[in-house]
Image (spheres, rainbow, N blue to C red):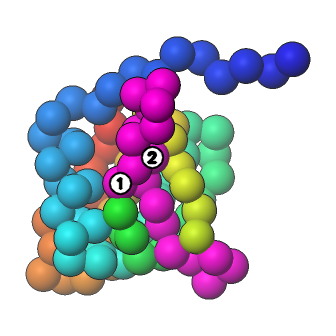
Amino acid sequence: MNAEPPYQPLDCRHYDALELACLRGDRLHVELRDGRVLEGRAAGLQTESDKAEYLRLQTDSGEQRIRLDQLQAITAQDPQVFAGRMVFD
């Protein structure tokens, strides 16, 4: 059995930035801790019963759910959005 490690909540400033990106439907370049890269539109945040939180990302191949503690960095693809690249501690 390959159980996921316990969820580690994000710092509030990162969560707030993701929440705003979802409200605006920002296009994001998402880098994950396992080396994968995804691109898509921020579609929402979701909290599961075990308190794990997920980013819903609408990609060309459909919606992807990304556990927030698996984020390495995100870069907004629209110039009016937060400046530069946000790296998750």
Give the percent coordinates (x, y) of residue 20.
17, 63
Label whose residue precedes the other's in the sequence (2 or 1): 1
Give the percent coordinates (x, y) of residue 77.
33, 78
Q: Nearer the viewer, residue 49 or 45?
A: 49
Instruction: Report the amino acid beneath label 2.
Output: Tyr
User: Which of the 4 image quadrants contains residue 12?
Assistant: top left
Question: Pointer 2: what residue?
Answer: 54
Q: Which mark is residue 71?
A: none
Q: Viewed as shown, does residue 23 lie left or right of 57?
A: left
Can residue 68 be seen? no
Residue appearing at x 48%, y 25% in the figure:
50
Residue span colored magenta: 45-62
Give the percent coordinates (x, y) of residue 45.
35, 54
Can residue 38 be seen? yes
Give the percent coordinates (x, y) of residue 13.
13, 40
Query: 10 Å neighbourhood of mark 1: few (<14), some, or many (≥20)?
Result: many
Give the position of the N terminus as an image quadrant: top right
Disc 2 from disc 1: Cα separation: 6 Å
Q: Secondary structure at mark 2?
A: strand
Q: Is residue 82 above or below residue 41?
A: above
Give the position of the C terminus as an image quadrant: top left
The furthest residue to the right: 1
Residue appearing at x 41%, y 76% in the figure:
41
Q: Which mark is residue 45?
A: 1
Please report contact status of discs 2 and 1: CB closer than 8 Å, yes or no.
yes
Which secondary structure is most common in the magenta stretch?
strand
**Magenta span includes 9:** no
